């Protein structure tokens, strides 16, 4: 199978030159198609996006909805595939340009297209558009992933004008849709309250979801969304587009609903404060806009993205992950060698893979004993750690435990040696008051010297702990007073910051390709698919109250696979440890508890839970996820994971009732099993001494479980229940 994928790189290249005849270009995946065509003016228009029809020869007769043409009494509206401004389009553009001669009008005419078959699952379509009056070109790129029904779309902009062209807006992609109504689901956040969901009808006009925060760009809004066409979609019904911008910086998603039947989505880097000067011969490559279409509701859309991510985007998406014990919530900044050595013992005792040392291990002139000092001074603190991180690393390995470390390399406290020595490395307005988030400022990653410094922080950490097995990469501040002390053109600041970050991450990955890295931003304020190319996982929130976490994890699952989501069992929340553990198991399990203070039975339960998790984690990490019952409307929330051969599944169920309800009466209708297979159901992860009411000797057909369902007997005394399903 692997061979099949590997054998054919660049199998087929076909170039189609422009001709006067109408061109039709189809971007196809297994179930969907985007049909683009040229019109009499040589404009590239989007004629259809949605479910495939059986007979391809009927695509050319898809009726155009462009009823308003130039000269009529109404607004001209053409569904151009990539809308430029300054000519006849007066709606929100994807591209706005000031040409070298100062002219602000751009027209894009179809020139040619090329299809490159990368392997038997991926095809890249490149469409060249040119301005007839200027030597200015846009190449639209569509990379279609057939099996996953996912398209990555981006654009490349270049010119040969006499002088510099300024890009005032430079989106990755436009998508034009028609329908009667459109419903947008997006998630909004604040620290500790990440990913709260809103879904609403898009009324006429423009709705923009964006970020101008520089770093931690998802602190207010997610850069991913779900858009339902005609009516709100449900989990398994409805036509829906799920999209996400792969960019670790300021983003902008425009949704413009106009006239009776139209919506145009424009996705790209936020052009806020970013008029980009492009020299002749330079190529501006926008980030990728990743999207999928599902005519079977949100569930399928999520699985498409999750499958695509695991196979093609997420770092080591098909691989393994390490369970861990983190010391943040158990010690905060207060620890020393002795405490850490005892935490290594706790890690071993619990049975997880890694001991992760969090914030507070560095800084000498300004010891990192709180969030106010030391950030940027990455030398181990000699008072707390007499023999440095090398010795804790060794202590861990001698005990058969791996060692991981926390870094926040993009940041600096004003109370630090780094701040004193390199004020020119810091993003700030020297003439203005400094504003801080969590008492810190952001280093200027547009500066090559800062990039080298950050790379060296990581490199030096590896020099001290060659067996380093995990990195938690934190980022607790957004950017106030945006200004680089060294960058010539401040309009490039936000873009160059992200490029600088990516270049550091590239270097790190080149030298340390395997080390698992967690993306963290004072909770989950930074997660996007571009970053996940370098990171194996992300931290969804500092809120580890398991009740809240059910919602947070539920919402992330719309876009990201469980293998990428780090969930820790902590002291937060009053629920029993079993409830906390069950919730944390729906992703990558970790702990942040005082293991030595656990009661005997809580410890025994946890040790068994780690073993049980090791037995089924494969299904959670690599299986298909089904959101069975949502936590908003049901007394019981339920999520399942089914492996690809459909012979094993795990179902997680939680009692969510907040009014007086004592039990769940109705069965849970399962999904994704094989109707013809016969299954046994067994309750797992039981607390020591408790007995399950589930009879594991009974056998059910997949058909029965997916139509009649199964009642896991969740109630106010059995508040979380995990069921393992196995075919016989
Ligand atoms: C914020 C992170 O989300 C926490 O988990 C922890 O690492 C702290 N930063 C440390 O300062």
Image: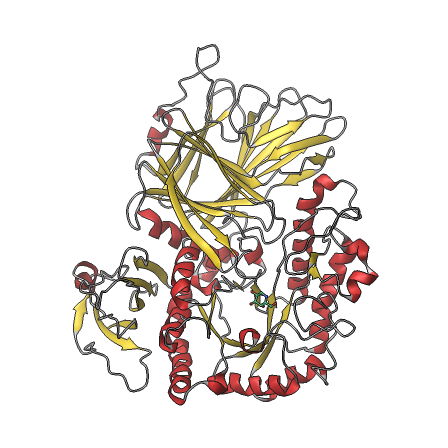
Residue at 74% across / 66% down in the picture?
456
Query: Quarter containing ligand 1?
Result: bottom right
Q: Which quarter of the rendering shows the N terminus?
A: bottom left
In this image, 87 relative to 389: left or right? left
Q: Name the foreground residue: 463 vs 472.
A: 472
Q: Is residue 330 above or below residue 542?
A: below
Q: Position of residue 365 (x, y in %)?
A: 79, 73
When asked about the image quadrant of residue 463, the answer is bottom right
Residue at 45% across / 54% down in the picture?
195
Tell me if I can see residue 15 in this picture.
no
When asked about the image quadrant of residue 573, the answer is bottom left
Q: Name the foreground residue: 189 vs 265.
A: 189
Residue at 51% across / 64% down in the picture?
542
Q: Position of residue 185 (x, y in %)?
A: 40, 45
Q: Name the foreground residue: 584 vs 649.
A: 584
In this image, 335 relative to 190: left or right? right
In this image, 10 relative to 697: left or right? right
Q: Which quarter of the rendering shows the C terminus?
A: bottom left
Q: Name the foreground residue: 453 vs 106.
A: 453
Tell me if I can see residue 107 in this picture.
yes
- The tally of labels here is 0
Q: Is residue 675 above or below residue 52?
A: below
Q: Position of residue 510 (x, y in %)?
A: 66, 63
Residue at 65% across / 64% down in the picture?
408
When asked about the image quadrant of residue 340, the answer is bottom right
Colour setting: secondary structure
Q: Position of residue 247 (x, y in %)?
A: 58, 48
């Amino acid at each position: 199978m692997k061979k099949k994928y590997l054998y054919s790189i660049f199998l087929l290249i076909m170039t189609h030159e422009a001709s006067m005849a109408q061109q039709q270009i189809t971007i196809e995946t297994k179930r969907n198609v985007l049909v683009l065509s040229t019109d009499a003016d040589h404009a590239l228009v989007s004629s259809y996006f949605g479910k495939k029809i059986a007979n391809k020869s009927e695509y050319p007769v898809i009726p155009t909805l462009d009823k308003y043409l130039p000269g009529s009494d109404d607004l001209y509206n053409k569904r151009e595939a990539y809308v430029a401004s300054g000519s006849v389009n007066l709606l929100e553009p994807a591209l706005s340009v000031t040409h070298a001669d100062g002219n602000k009008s751009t027209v894009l005419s179809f020139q040619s297209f090329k299809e490159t078959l990368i392997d038997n699952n991926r095809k890249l379509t490149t469409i060249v558009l040119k301005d007839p009056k200027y030597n200015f070109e846009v190449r639209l790129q569509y990379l279609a992933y057939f099996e996953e029904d996912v398209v990555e779309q981006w654009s490349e902009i270049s010119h040969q004008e006499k002088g510099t062209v300024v890009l005032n807006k430079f989106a990755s992609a436009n998508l034009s849709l028609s329908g009667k109504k459109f419903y947008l689901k997006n998630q909004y956040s604040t620290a500790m309250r990440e990913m709260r969901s809103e879904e609403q009808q898009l009324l006429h006009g423009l709705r923009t979801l964006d970020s101008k925060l520089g770093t931690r760009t998802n602190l207010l809004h997610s850069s991913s969304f779900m858009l339902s066409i005609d009516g709100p979609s449900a989990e398994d019904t409805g036509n829906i587009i799920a999209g996400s911008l792969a960019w670790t910086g300021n983003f902008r998603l425009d949704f413009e609903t106009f006239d009776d039947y139209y919506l145009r989505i424009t996705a790209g880097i936020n052009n806020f404060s970013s008029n980009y000067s492009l020299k002749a011969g330079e190529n501006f490559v926008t980030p990728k806009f990743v999207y999928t279409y599902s005519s079977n509701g949100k569930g399928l859309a999520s699985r498409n993205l999750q499958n695509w991510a695991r196979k093609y985007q997420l770092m080591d998406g098909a691989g393994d992950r390490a369970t861990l014990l983190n010391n943040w919530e158990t010690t905060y900044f207060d620890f020393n060698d002795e405490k850490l050595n005892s935490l290594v013992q706790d890690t071993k005792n619990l049975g997880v893979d890694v001991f992760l040392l969090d914030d507070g291990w560095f800084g000498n002139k300004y010891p990192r004993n709180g969030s106010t000092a030391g950030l940027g001074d990455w030398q181990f603190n000699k008072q707390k750690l007499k023999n440095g991180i090398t010795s804790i690393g060794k202590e861990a390995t001698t005990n058969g435990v791996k060692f991981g470390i926390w870094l926040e390399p993009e940041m600096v406290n004003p109370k630090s040696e780094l701040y004193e020595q390199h004020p020119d490395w810091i993003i700030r307005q020297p003439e203005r008051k400094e504003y801080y988030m969590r008492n810190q400022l952001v280093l200027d990653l547009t500066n090559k010297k800062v990039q080298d410094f950050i790379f060296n922080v990581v490199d030096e950490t590896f020099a001290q702990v060659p067996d380093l097995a995990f990195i938690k990469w934190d980022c607790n501040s957004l950017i106030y007073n945006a200004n680089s002390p060294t960058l010539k053109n401040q309009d490039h600041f936000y873009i160059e910051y992200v490029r600088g970050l990516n270049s550091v991450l590239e270097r790190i990955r080149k030298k340390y390709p395997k080390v698992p890295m967690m993306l963290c931003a004072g909770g989950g304020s930074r997660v996007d698919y571009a970053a996940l190319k370098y990171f194996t996982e992300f931290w969804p929130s500092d809120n580890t109250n398991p009740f809240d976490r059910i919602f947070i994890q539920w919402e992330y699952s719309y876009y990201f696979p469980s293998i990428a989501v780090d969930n820790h069992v902590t002291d937060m929340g009053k629920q029993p440890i079993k409830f906390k553990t069950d919730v944390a198991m729906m992703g990558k399990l970790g702990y942040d508890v005082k293991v030595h203070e656990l009661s005997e039975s809580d410890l025994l339960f946890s040790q068994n839970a780690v073993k049980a998790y090791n037995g089924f984690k494969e299904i959670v990490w690599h299986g298909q996820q089904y959101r069975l019952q949502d936590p908003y409307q049901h007394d019981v929330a339920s999520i399942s994971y089914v492996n690809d051969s459909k012979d094993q599944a795990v179902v997680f169920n939680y009692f969510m009732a907040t009014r007086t309800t004592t039990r769940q009466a109705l069965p849970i209708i399962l999904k994704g099993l094989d109707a013809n297979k016969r299954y046994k159901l067994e309750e797992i992860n039981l607390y020591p001494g408790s007995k399950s009411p589930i009879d594991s000797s009974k056998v059910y057909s997949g058909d029965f479980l997916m139509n009649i369902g199964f009642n896991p007997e969740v109630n106010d005394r059995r508040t979380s229940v995990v069921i393992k399903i196995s075919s016989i």
